[in-house]
Amino acid sequence: MFEHHLTHWEEDVLKEIGNIGAAHAATSLSRLLGERIDMEVPSARLLDFSEIAAEVGEDHLYVATFLEFGGDVKGSFVWLIEPQSAHQLLQALFQDQAHLKKSASDDDHFSDLELSALQEIGNILAGSYLSALADLTGLKLYPHVPGLVVDMGMAVITYGLLEAGHYGEQAVVIDAHLTSRDAKYGGRFFLLPDPHSFQVLYHALGVYANGRDA
Amino acid sequence: MDVMHDVIKVGIAELASARHPGRIRTAGLGSCVGVALYDRRRKIGGLAHVMLPDSKQARGSVKLAKYADTAIPELLRQMEALGAMRWDMVAKLAGGAQMFEHVSSDALKIGERNVEAVRTVLQMIGIPIVAEAVGGRVGRTVELDLEDGTYYVRTAQSEQLKL
């Protein structure tokens, strides 16, 4: 499916997708919290499945939101946040509200209420990311219902690789880091488009006028 | 566990086999299945991180370790090359979870289908499954001890199981 590398054009386009998507998600998060959120320059890479463990840790625990999207382009969106960071985020969000316990910021346990708040945040972030991507490309994208688990990042990401797995042992991973100004909390977005969606993305963004297919 | 230097690591859609001593490990099994085969008599073991059930669905060349129907025969072949005997082998399984409810139909049952495919192949080959920790909603990390065939299964938020 892939020729073992991305051309510069392809990489630039995918990076731009990550840039615009993550910037919009960062803006949403910033509005939600009334606080500035910084974003690192996103990367777009073709990764071997064997490299995924090094990216997210072999069995490292995260609060992970997983969401599939369909429409003109299909794929998955993943938001990984460290448990401790998720507790900080919840505290920032519900500053003085007594129904959220404040003591447990160092453990991996979350109440149902906290989990549903995190799931809603994940939903909002995915929604802003994907709607920015739809605006940029003029393509239709429909987010599905998100799922949230506190579990191994690698086990979660693998769900986004299943379609790519039919074609080979590589997948394009577009990822971006967000952090709050005081670096108390942050997280990482992954966009994993299905292999047959790339042509659609490249065409929508006019890469093939200059790229490999020209 | 992580500081041991005689641990062979197996990634997604990979497999490995070896003689004792040491361990073979694979991490982050969600819908994937960690299939361990072990010849107790000769202390030879193998582990495959199976990602998909059926190699006939591949579009393009088939990586044997990725599919249930090709990974198990390949693992068996490698272990027999090391001197293992099929009739002395047992199988242990872990993984095949369904972590999310709201995923596309293809991804929804993938864990279950992986486990089903693994069971079918093992039955055809005639290797009994003596222990398993499959299904549920949790990710798992596994380690096969080549000394005695113990299969350590750990989930992110609970104690380690010994199979």
Image: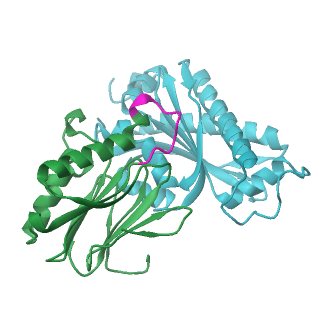
Identify whether B11 is placed above or below A6: below
Q: How is the image coloured?
A: by chain
Residue beneath the point at 66% across and 58% down: A83
Per the rendering, the colour in which chain B appears is green
- Identify the chain drawn in cyan: A
Residue A119: horizontal and vertical position, in percent?
67, 41
Residue beneath the point at 63% across and 26% down: A131
Identify whether B20 is placed above or below B64: below
- Quadrant where the N terminus of chain A is found in the figure: top left
Residue beneath the point at 45% across and 30% down: B104
Identify whether B35 is placed above or below B53: below
Magenta span dominant secondary structure: loop
Range covered by the magenta-colored residues: B97-106
Residue B38: horizontal and vertical position, in percent?
21, 68
Residue B34: horizontal and vertical position, in percent?
33, 57
- For the residue pair A212 and A59, the one nearer the viewer reads as A59
- Quadrant where the C terminus of chain A is found in the figure: top left
Quadrant of res A126: top right
Quadrant of res A53: bottom left
